[in-house]
Amino acid sequence: MINKETFHPLNYIKKEEYSGSMDGMRYMMKRVKGEEADMIRVTIWPEPYGIHKTPEEEKQFIEVPLSEDGEAQAADWLNEQYEEQKERWRGSLRKPWV
């Protein structure tokens, strides 16, 4: 689980993509242009592959404001998705590496 007290990638995201994983769930956070302001796009997908080798239908994403509040929303969403789809993530760990 992501600890919001120590999870602070906002300044990094303003310049680069930020990625990580939690027990079979991979995620990437990156800055994107929104209609009115820049946003953080948070994408999740199952292991074992990277984001570019994973089929689009296996990915889920949200966009949140590029701000401290958005950073907190992203952490909450990642934790929620991890808990709600725990079996999916655990199942991805059993897939053979190709």
Image (cartoon, rainbow, N blue to C red):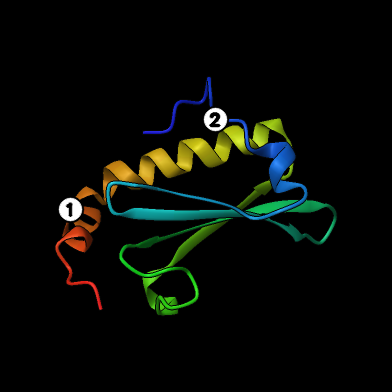
Left or right: 92, with 50 as reference point = left
How many numbered tags mark residues here? 2
Quadrant location, the N terminus: top left
Farthest residue, direction top? 5
Residue lying at 44% horizontally and 44% vertically, measured from the top left: 78
Residue lying at 25% horizontally and 55% vertically, measured from the top left: 89
Which comes sooner in the sequence, label 2 or label 1?
2
Left or right: 14, with 29 as reference point = right
Residue 93 place in picture, x, y as percent? 20, 59
* Residue named by callout 2: 7
Q: Which element is circle 2 on?
A: loop
| Residue 61, placed above or below residue 50 | above
Residue 47 place in picture, x, y as percent? 31, 63
* Residue named by callout 1: 87
Residue 2's mark? none
The foreground one among 65 and 44 is 44
Farthest residue, direction right? 36
Q: Which element is circle 1 on?
A: helix
Q: Which amino acid does label 2 sit on?
A: Phe
Quadrant location, the C terminus: bottom left
Residue lying at 37% horizontally and 72% vertically, measured from the top left: 58
Residue 59 place in picture, x, y as percent? 43, 68
| Residue 40, placed above or below residue 75 | below
Mark 2 or 1, closer to the camera: 2
The span from disc 2 to disc 1 (Cα, nearest Å) is: 24 Å
